[in-house]
Image (cartoon, rainbow, N blue to C red):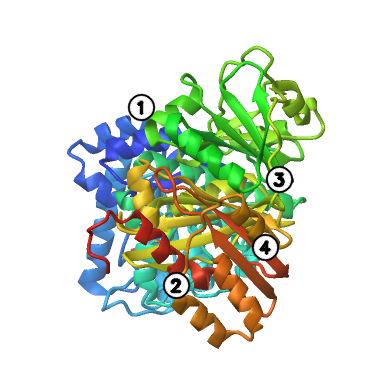
Amino acid sequence: MKSAIATVSVSGTLKEKLAAIARAGFDGIEIFEQDFIADAGSPRDIGTMIRDHGLEILLFQPFRDFEGLVGDQRRKAFDRARYKFETMRKLGADLMLVCSSLHPNALGGIDRAAQDFAELGELAATFGMRVGYEALAWGRHVNDHRDAWEIVRRADHPNIGLILDSFHTLARKIDPDSIRRIPRDKIFFVQLADAPQISMDLFYWSRHFRNMPGEGDLRVQDFMRAVAATGYDGTVSLEIFNDQFRGAQPEGIARDGYRALHVLMDDVRRSEPDVLVDIPPMPARTRVGGVEFVEFATRAEEAGQLAGMLRSMGFSHLGDHVSKAVTLWQQGDIRLILNQETTGFASSAYNMHGTTICDVGLRVDDAGATTERARALGATPFNQSVGPGEMDIPAIRSVGGSVMHFIDDTSDLADVWSVEFRRPVVAATPDAGLSRIDHLAETMHYEDMLSWALFHTSIFDMSRSEIVDVVDPDGLVRSVAMKSANGAVRITLNGADTHRTLVGNFLADSFGGAIQHVAFATGDIFSTARRMRDSGFDPLVLTENYYGDLRARFSLEPGRLDEMKSLNILYDETAQGAFYQFYSRPFASGLFFEIVQRVGAYDGYGAPNAPFRTAAQKQLLRPKGMPQR
Ligand SMILES: O=C(O)c1ccc(O)c(O)c1
Ligand SMILES: [Mg+2]
């Protein structure tokens, strides 16, 4: 299999696109005619520039409004085709995509179109070229790959074949298994795109909202399984028209494309074990069993503030690192690390963001296999020189430039706490009943949200929820949740559109995306809240109106409600169960903590409460004297 990406999928000049595509690891490109025409170079020079980047031109596209015409218009269509073949010869391309016609005078008729393609095949053959026919979902007469295939079949010419595009097939809800009936040698090229499920005009949906396989809601895997089952082993290419991608950094888009394509092919290989899928092997998605630690880079006053906050939440200072200014805080299964080093990675993270979560350790089945899969999918390994008494724990660069470590039980990595830390001579703090990390909430620019989600769902066995909108007093925040199969690891992503929202403020104040809050689970939130109050914890205070509304919405016992109000506990309820939560006040550049209790099979994050707690948090962040809206 050769991997490719269309030049339309990436932003920048042609040269910038090529550099990003080559660096990401693709074998070749589909050159979009626009990119070719807009470039000042001659066709030969452009062809050379592409090959100098180590890339092949695997497709030239699109050739429009060809079939179904008569008379002069038909002759003109063949003249245009001849000109394209001449251009392709100079470029060094030998496969052209013809998309189904939108021409107002196109007559339709399967046999007429077949005749047009039989003749085009003859012309292509004189240039030593091949032509693939693609049904656009909004084509005038042909908008279904099954009709395009019938035309190709009747054209019966060795230089004429079919091009399949997952978007056109899946957007029209055509059963992808119909592809299994097509002979592999007549499929000349395969294009992949996903898209979020939104009801809108097919043309507009396709031109603006396509995204990488796995980033949307279409059944791209079923489509690709059907293609693979035919025995097709030619190029698989990403053709993504997306407004956001057009404005994003080309490197990021190309890297995500490579990751999305390879993870899809790996999934196809695992779900169709009897079908040959020719991509380099990689270990399976890793099962994540929990969060082993969360590390803060912090200093000076903020470090003192953070330590005080942890104490008020019932964490005990249980370890001092053998060689570094690093302390370990623990409660239940939760381990927090405060790193105050002035050199190394945590220090650079602090210099960049202020107090920040710079590192997360995940418990996985096999730490080595995890890093191997991450690397195969284009992630960067992380190495820092190992100090005296330290263990070398497998790690990668995560999203937003932070680090992720992997700890497993099969090696002695699980002993890192006793090996690297000594118990200090301080008394333990009374525990508040926090048992484990319920979720980590990451904040990023909205444009980066799909990329962050793809990172997690491609490496780990985590699934993604739908994207939901959360209202902030100053704008909209889009939110998506990911969780591991057993629910042991949950990560939420909050994408900010503007800097005026709470998460947007955090991005501006901390210079980029990171974990903004950590939620801890307790089995008895009332007891935890009381114990924390007694230790001096300062909760986020909700309005009187919030509790008035709770009383009206749910049948909560009045005594219970009063208690919730006095402890600032928020509440949500679904058919699956109930959810209690309360928050700390924000500190440093806007970090905060949350305490939650899940009852029954409640699977959410209290989204109906988000506008109210966000408003309360923002009140605290507004400088005094600012108009309060
Ligand atoms: O939107 C279009 O016009 C267009 C062009 C070429 C393609 O391969 C395609 O899928 C769509
Ligand atoms: Mg296409």
Q: Position of residue 397 (x, y in %)?
A: 53, 33
Residue at which label 3 appears: 430
Q: Considering only order in the chain, which callout, 4 or 1, is on the residue closer to the N terminus?
A: 1
Residue at which label 1 appears: 52
Q: Dot 4: what SS?
A: helix
Q: Dot 2: what SS?
A: loop
Quarter of the C terminus within the rendering: bottom left
Judge by depth and name the residue closer to the eye, 409 or 78. Answer: 409
Q: For mark 4, does the 10 Å Cα neighbourhood hold few (<14), some (14 to 19), or many (20 or more) residues?
A: many
Q: Where is residue 508 in the image (x, y as percent from the top left)?
A: 32, 46
Residue at screen point 56% across, 50% down = 536
Q: Considering only order in the chain, which callout, 2 or 1, is on the residue closer to the N terminus?
A: 1
In this view, 225 is above or below 548: above
Residue at which label 4 appears: 525
Q: For mark 1, does the 10 Å Cα neighbourhood hold few (<14), some (14 to 19), or many (20 or more) residues?
A: few
Residue at screen point 44% across, 72% down = 543
Amino acid identity at mark 2: Thr
* Among the 4 quarters of the image, the one containing residue 67: bottom left
Residue at which label 2 appears: 543
Q: Is residue 10 visible?
A: no
